[in-house]
Image (tube, rainbow, N blue to C red):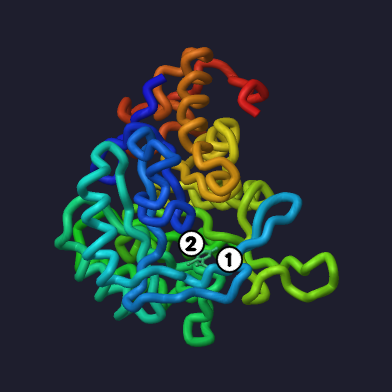
């Protein structure tokens, strides 16, 4: 099966990327993952100033996934420009890279994007508008505040021609409207979804499992949340969707593609098995070959904008995924 996807003005060699916050800036995983075998990666979110992050423990497992409150720990704009981007430029050619950007104010997003836009070696920006662990000056994440969302996306849009993804929160009762706000403000794609706010308590009664208290839930527990977000938004917005949340296997990736995602991201699975994304790429390809699916672009509720054939295609047969689980 041809795994290539033409979207965001480029060709992804396959639709599987590593999600923001789970692969550092690539360099950190290079001894354990063949990054060049993947569709790409999204960096840890970059802020204007370095951030030390939240008190440990920052992650805790539970039966169906994980909860985290890392608190946006990252070396800050200057160090990313000086040390992280040069590594990406020198080492990644086939994998497409999005730099994730976060900030407390629209100005901070604009300054980061302006500063990095002239650098080479990456494709675009993913605007992190949905971190559950960053009380933006006591307010809601940008994606839950339509005016703030519009301001960030439209002001960044005016500063860069690179592909812009808007990463949205799952706990949004107006998700289709939010998606259209991002679309109207000039986003090129939507990343659905960030983690779901949650709380895990220590089983011995010592209080929250995380140093910071509550956090963001990820892993298999949230896959139906992410798939629903993709399916729902696809009905209401035209933008290509990047699906993320609880993908552990090629079957899970297929579920997102069938719901309407053009690309997927793997996050929590990488913590348990650094090569999970590589395995998903190989399993997808083998599945498609066995099933006679010529191209991954043919998988979906119907053809989307960007389908190379420009027509509606269904898979040749209702293809089961039991073999992939
Ligand atoms: O750093 C974090 O605690 C974090 C971020 Br920025 C985010 O977007 N999502 C998340 O679950 N954790």
Which residue lies most toward the left here? 118
Instruction: Report which quarter residue 218 is drawn in.
Output: bottom right
Q: Quadrant of the C terminus?
A: top right
- Distance between mark 2 and mark 1 Cα atoms: 9 Å
Question: Residue 155: in sight, yes or no?
Answer: no
Question: Residue 220: in sight, yes or no?
Answer: yes
Which residue lies most toward the front here? 31
Q: Secondary structure at mark 1?
A: loop
Q: Secondary structure at mark 2?
A: strand
At 65% from the left edge and 56% from the top edge, which residue is drawn? Answer: 66
Which residue lies most toward the bottom here? 137
x and y percentages locating residue 110 in the rendered image: 27, 74
Given residues 41 and 305, the one toward you in this image is 41
Task: Residue 172: give its label.
Answer: 1
At 73% from the left edge and 66% from the top edge, which residue is drawn? Answer: 200
x and y percentages locating residue 185 in the rendered image: 33, 66
Task: Residue 298: give its label.
Answer: none
> Which residue matches tag 2?
168
At 46% from the left edge and 30% from the top edge, which residue is drawn? Answer: 281
């Amino acid at each position: 099966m041809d795994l290539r996807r033409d979207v965001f003005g480029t060709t992804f060699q396959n639709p599987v990327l590593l999600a923001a916050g789970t692969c550092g800036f690539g360099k950190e995983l290079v001894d354990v993952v063949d990054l060049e075998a993947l569709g790409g990666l999204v960096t840890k979110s970059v802020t204007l100033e370095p951030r030390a992050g939240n008190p440990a423990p920052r992650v805790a497992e539970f039966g169906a996934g994980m909860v985290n409150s890392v608190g946006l720990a990252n070396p800050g704009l200057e160090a990313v420009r000086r040390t992280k981007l040069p590594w990406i430029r020198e080492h990644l050619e086939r994998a497409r890279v999005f730099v994730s950007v976060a900030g407390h104010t629209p100005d901070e997003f604009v300054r980061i994007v302006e500063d990095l836009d002239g650098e080479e070696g990456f494709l675009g920006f993913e605007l992190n508008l949905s971190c559950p662990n960053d009380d933006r000056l006591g307010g809601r994440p940008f994606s839950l505040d339509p005016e703030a969302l519009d301001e960030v996306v439209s002001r960044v849009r005016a500063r860069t021609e690179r592909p812009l993804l808007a990463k949205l929160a799952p706990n949004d009762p107006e998700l289709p409207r939010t998606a259209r706000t991002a679309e109207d403000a000039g986003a090129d794609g939507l990343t659905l979804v960030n983690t779901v706010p949650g709380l895990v308590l220590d089983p011995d009664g010592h209080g929250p499992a995380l140093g910071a208290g509550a956090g963001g839930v990820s892993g298999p527990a949230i896959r139906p949340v992410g798939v629903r977000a993709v399916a729902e938004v696809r009905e209401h917005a035209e933008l290509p969707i990047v699906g993320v949340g609880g993908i552990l296997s090629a079957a899970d990736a297929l579920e997102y593609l069938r719901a309407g995602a053009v690309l997927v991201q793997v996050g929590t699975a990488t913590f348990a098995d650094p090569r999970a994304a590589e395995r998903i790429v190989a399993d997808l390809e083998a599945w498609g070959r066995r099933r006679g699916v010529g191209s991954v672009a043919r998988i979906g509720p119907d053809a989307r904008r960007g389908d190379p054939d420009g027509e509606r295609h269904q898979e040749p047969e209702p293809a089961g995924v039991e073999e992939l689980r």
